[in-house]
Image (cartoon, coloured by chain):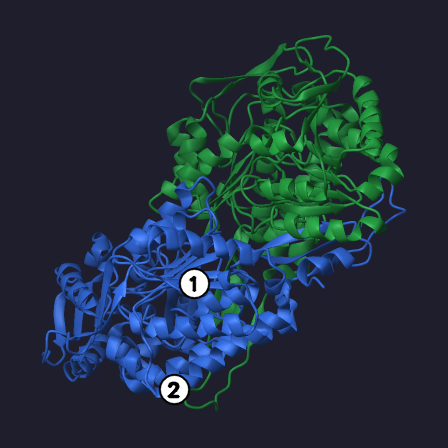
Chain colours: A green, B blue
Amino acid sequence: MTLALTGRSWIAGLRSAGSAPAGRAIEAATGRPLEPLYLEATDGELDRACRAAAEAFESTELTEISRRAALLRAVADRIEALGEPLLERAHLETALPMDRMRTERGRTCGQLRFFASLIEEGSWIGERLDPAQPQRTPLAKPEIRCFRVPIGPVAVFCASNFPLAFSVAGVDTAAALAAGCPAVVHAHFAHPGTAEAIGTVITEAVAALGFPEGTFSLLYGAGHGVGRRLVEHPAIRAVGFTGSRAGGRALMDLAARRPEPIPVYAEMSSVNPLFILPGALAGRGAAIARGLHSSATLGVGQFCTKPGLIFLERGAAAASFERELAALYSATAAQPMLHAGIRAGYEEKRRRVRAGARLVAQGAEPASPQQAQAFLHAVEAERFLADPRHQEEVFGPSALLVICDHHSQMLQCARSLEGQLTATLHAEPSDRDSAHALARILVHRAGRLVWNGYPTGVEISPAMVHGGPYPATSDSRSSSVGSLALERYSRWVSVQGAEGDALALALRKPQ
Amino acid sequence: MTLALTGRSWIAGLRSAGSAPAGRAIEAATGRPLEPLYLEATDGELDRACRAAAEAFESTELTEISRRAALLRAVADRIEALGEPLLERAHLETALPMDRMRTERGRTCGQLRFFASLIEEGSWIGERLDPAQPQRTPLAKPEIRCFRVPIGPVAVFCASNFPLAFSVAGVDTAAALAAGCPAVVHAHFAHPGTAEAIGTVITEAVAALGFPEGTFSLLYGAGHGVGRRLVEHPAIRAVGFTGSRAGGRALMDLAARRPEPIPVYAEMSSVNPLFILPGALAGRGAAIARGLHSSATLGVGQFCTKPGLIFLERGAAAASFERELAALYSATAAQPMLHAGIRAGYEEKRRRVRAGARLVAQGAEPASPQQAQAFLHAVEAERFLADPRHQEEVFGPSALLVICDHHSQMLQCARSLEGQLTATLHAEPSDRDSAHALARILVHRAGRLVWNGYPTGVEISPAMVHGGPYPATSDSRSSSVGSLALERYSRWVSVQGAEGDALALALRKPQ
């Protein structure tokens, strides 16, 4: 079995005719172009996809919870049924190892089924009931109930670094469909074949389960034109995006300038600071060096939660930690990155951002232009505080040690940080007061505090917050992973004075 | 006892020196200027207020729930202790009757105490716990918990039409302080004395309870300069506003263009459509006419939930309803509006927006330039659909009947509506299917559906949603009244791997 790829967008159940070439996939490990040629969706096709999404949104099918749950499960089943060819294509397009692709498929399908179970369980809808008080004076109180309703058609922008879990059937699409919102997805140019294979099974599942065609579309486009027109389309009511800070901010600005502004959930950039307190550094520095190196170089450092800044206090334990970490970085193999743009960005950013820092260690030399070399640098806290460039994300296997003279300087560094997805503390009982002082600063600068652990590995669970203050995300009130992600494409509505719950029921599950 | 008014801003516990005159209060019923002269806060004072708010935010006092609850209650007690002079000043400044001022004071103090109880009860914090699974393969699962934390210093813009309940100690300030956020409040020029009296008791309560001075500031400014600089100040993390569509949109645009964009909760405009279905029109048209007239002219039509558009189907029952409503409008007294700007806006807007509509009835002639005359107009649905001007809000005692030829035209009108705070349906059991079809459209266009009632009278309760899609508000995911308002100045955070709940506790209630 092989994947049947055509190079066309899916426009509300129909293959796009396409127009100008949008480009071919590139085999990430070699730079070799892959078939087929992808064609850009036309303006008319984009408009058709968005209008069909608006029609689908007001249809009855999407209001039925059991049908939406069935759709999410059908998509998961059909992704699994694509078998090894899907994983092989994703591996070719991204250079991510087959094992990782297998794990990510599991995460993606698990996530679809997780949302199906959540909407069946139903508490996410948050229903609250204020009973009527007909005898109240001076005015009788009517019955009021509130619950969440879907926000409307969602534009989803796929991530380059998770070709399955944050892409066409990834968390934003799953959350949108689960909440009752049609999804118009913008494929990422780095893995167009993987995107098409997934888009095809979603389109098939939508048709097989009798949903309106506009429930799902998948658009290809070169450059920013298709994405811009998508965010500007009046039928679109919210945007999900995972990618760069520049890209996310551009979408935020577009959405804010619309005649009718809409929410944007952009997950953009994070350096994921990790603080090692003296007790932890002295007691288990070697173990932390191993854990940190593994987290920071996992997936060639191409995780949004990669720890990129490590804060520690000067001294013998710090020197020993630095030697241990340097040894691990020196032994790190060069590996191919997701695509040439990311590889070039890594090189440019690392040179620019680490320019003022001392080189501590570098990994094996790259054997091909696609591979990235691991780098460890260090800088004094005083210089770190003086130059905001040190806070910039370097997407790839590069990290920076920040050497503090004392604890209050570490607190000062924490206070200087921009918004982050995560912040990590390593502390022993002897560090307790310092750790809590640090945590009280970091809690206002990150979406997740990790205690004696490492930030990579984002659990899909009820208590997960994968978010954080700008520029980590565009909207610190939300999470793009876990149960909370289900709430992002909804809004609250009250129903007042409806006898019994007839009207409230009618609004969610019409006959 | 009289109110001691100075004409100065409160800057983190200190009286402003002030600079340029910002203007005097005007007695709304007569146009007579009142003492004292109010002075604009300087740029330096504004900066000081915002920086002090940022410092207060990171202090420990604001993290203690019992202390925050005590502060909210102390503010309520001190507002009540101001006694009649506060109500008299508010009455002078707004022309709202003393009875209404008394009720609004009750609402304001009740709201402060309601939030105090809510934070003590604690469930709003939304804590969720994922237990650790140390034996899980391939990777152990750490314990993860999440909960809400305050977002940071909030800029609050007061409303003209609720000098107490949506102003200095109104719902946005109460929600901000309850959540643990300092508030920097921008006084409304229409009731500066009322604002100062309240600002003074908050300042006193902040000092008496040992909170950092930056917990609260109150700024006066003429024009838009102070407001603009406030929203642009880097220490401000969120904005609350109740007012006009133009004003709210201006703040949204400013906040979106900041280097670090922040959430804006602007409650802006709504025409609150009311649909009367044939069974209800035939069965109880006269009663609906009375209820509607009362809701639409209450407070001189100066409520954001005033029903401004009434949809009904042509026929004998509609003609009879129109006659009954016309008789009520003809007998409506002219009354003074909140201030000259609102009075002028009412006149201009009504003339422009109702230009193409048929005059059905008008109330008594105004006896002074401060008073507003009530107007009832009517238009055919076809013309309504052709001209979006008919959807514009006319703030004041003016309403528009929209006469539909048949039910599907009524549905078409519903589909054409912009975002609203409320939408109301009057229906009898015989209207059930039509009403549900209408509700399924309206639920995506309003924050609250009222069934066989009237939209004015917004309960402060757990299930209330006072919000709605743009342009009713800037953020349809939130409510500015009730328990849900407490969530708007918070964000989610996860804590991963903290043994026991020591760290989580430390983050919310330090020793």
From the viewer's side, name the closer residue of A169 and B87: B87
Q: For residue A459, which quarter of the picture?
A: top right
> Distance between the Cα atoms at labels 2 and 1?
23 Å
Chain for numbered disc 1: B
Q: Kindly identify which residue carries mark 1.
A: B217
Badge 1 local density, few (<14 within 10 Å), some, or many (20+)?
many
Kindly identify which numbered label has been placed on residue A267.
none
Residue type, label 2: Gly
Residue type, label 1: Ser
- The answer to whether residue B428 is above or below residue B502 is below
Instruction: Determine whether, in the image, residue A203 is placed left or right of residue B300.
Output: right
- The answer to whether residue A149 is above or below residue A111 is below
The answer to whether residue B194 is seen in the rendering is yes
Kindly identify which numbered label has been placed on residue B83.
2
Q: Residue B30 location in percent, x, y? A: 15, 78
- The answer to whether residue B469 is above or below residue A323 is below
Q: Residue A477 location in percent, x, y? A: 56, 51
Chain for numbered disc 2: B
